[in-house]
Amino acid sequence: MNLSFWRGKRVFLTGHTGFKGEWISLWLQQLGAELTGFALQPPAQPNQQHEASLLRLDVSKAAHRLAWRPFLNLDAGLQLTVNWARASLEGQGMDAYTRTQINEYQTRVAVS
């Protein structure tokens, strides 16, 4: 992928305030795009709860029924994610990079 393609390009992005739109906005800005965003105003009285207030993430059932345990702690998982994003922004071959990360993870898990 030719990331320099975006340098100086004028980009009109709809939905730039949503989760995906925010990340795309940051990515395009870092690549040098001139970004203009448009999003609808949120409803004054939303009729649905936000998903985040409904989620109750809990691994206890997996731990109990499957004897599952996380291999990576939060810091290690975030570091892998940041490294991947940085490699992508630097224009590295992401297919090979991703496969390398997966192989390294599998090797670490097999050794433990």
Image (tube, rainbow, N blue to C red):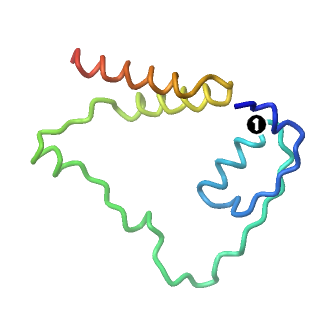
Give the total number of marks visible in the rendering: 1
Q: Nearer the viewer, residue 57 or 14?
A: 14
Residue that mark 1 sits on: 30
Decide: is 15 above or below 20: below
Q: Nearer the viewer, residue 96 or 49?
A: 96
Is 102 positioned to the left or the right of 66 in the image?
A: right
Neighbor class of circle 1 (other Cα within 10 Å; few <14, some 14-19, many 20+) is few
User: Whole-percent x and y of residue 3?
Assistant: 75, 32
For the point 15% across and 43% down, the residue is 63
User: Whole-percent x and y of residue 24?
Assistant: 68, 48
For the point 82% across and 57% down, the residue is 12
What element does badge 1 sit on? helix
Decide: is 101 above or below 37: above
Corner quadrant of residue 37? bottom right
Amino acid beneath label 1: Gln
User: Whole-percent x and y of residue 89?
Assistant: 67, 30
Is 36 positioned to the left or the right of 1 in the image?
A: right
For the point 87% across and 44% down, the residue is 9
User: Whole-percent x and y of residue 111?
Assistant: 23, 14
Q: Nearer the viewer, residue 79 or 2?
A: 2
Q: Quadrant of the N terminus?
A: top right
Is 72 positioned to the left or the right of 34 in the image?
A: left
For the point 44% across and 24% down, the residue is 99
